[in-house]
Image: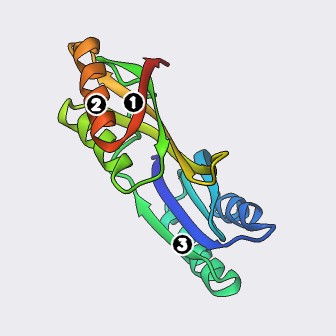
Amino acid sequence: MRRWFILSAIGRDRPGIVADLATLIFKSEANLEDSRMTLLGNEFAAILLCSGTAPDLESRLRLGAGRLEWENRLTVFLRPLDGEPRPAVPAPGTRLVRIEAEGLDRAGIVAGVCRTLADRRCNIADLSSSTRPSETGSTIYRLSILAEVPDPTDTQELEAALDDAGRSIGVEVRIEPA
């Protein structure tokens, strides 16, 4: 029987972290199904979905994760999934939209946009953000979201709500089909 696991790891950035994580999964006789990895500040962060059929897969992954924590100063978290992963994006009964928000960096941008989506039962499938300097020296914040919008949702109402949220937090928000 196939079992699924989420493995996340965070550690000071260095060459070889991805190779170490992929080797752990391979040597545990699991398959790397999906992943997201990025550099945040001085830390490298990874979240991986893996699966396998070995009866002792969880203990193999836990033992290997412990070894990586000890040898490479990584923080590793392993969690079994209940059942199989959800359907691919977009889930049935939803449509995919991309939401971009940009403006002067300030607290509350992500909270404001995401609360507007959550209040309309929109599911965030992917989110990334970054900052960059402007010509004037101030910091510009950019937010990009891929969201699943329930089919009965009125797109014009969602767009108006996101515009209102953007105005209240001082950012421009755009929405378009993904």
Helix, strand or loop status at disc 2: loop
Looking at this rendering, what residue extends furthest in the right direction?
Answer: 15
Q: Residue 175 is drawn in which quadrant?
A: top left
Whether residue 59 is visible to the viewer of this picture, yes or no, is no
The alpha-carbon separation of the residues under discs 3 and 1 comes to 28 Å
Crowding near the residue tagged with mark 2, few <14, some 14–19, many ≥20 C-alpha atoms within 10 Å: many
- The answer to whether marks 3 and 2 mark residues whose Cβ atoms lie closer than 8 Å is no
Image position of 135 (left or right of 116): right
Mark sitting earlier along the chain (3/2) = 3
Q: Residue flagged by tag 1: what amino acid is it?
A: Ala
Please state which of residues 169 and 75 is positioned toward the viewer in this rendering.
169
Residue ID for mark 2: 122
Mark 3 — residue? 76
What residue appears at the point 36 percent right and 25 percent down from the top-left corner? 91
Q: Nearer the viewer, residue 89 or 23?
A: 89
Nearer-N-terminus badge (3/1)? 3
Dot 1 or dot 2: first in sequence order is 2
What residue is drawn where x is 29% and y is 17%? Answer: 93
The three-letter amino acid code for the residue at tag 2 is: Cys
Secondary structure of the residue carrying numbered label 3: strand
Q: Is residue 115 above or below residue 122?
A: below
Picture disc at residue 139: none
Residue drawn at (24%, 26%) of the image: 161
Gap in angstroms between the C-alphas marked 3 and 2: 30 Å
| Mark 1 neighbour class, 10 Å CA radius: few under 14, some 14 to 19, many 20 or more | many
Rendered location of residue 18, percent (x, y) = 72, 60
Q: How would you rate the neighbour count of disc 3 (Cα within 10 Å): few for under 14, some for 14-19, many for 20 or more?
A: many
Q: Is residue 108 left or right of residue 106?
A: left
Q: Which mark is residue 147?
A: 1
| Image position, residue 78 (x, y; %) | 47, 66
| Amino acid type for the residue under numbered disc 3 | Val
Query: Is the C-beta separation of discs 1 and 2 under 8 Å?
Result: yes
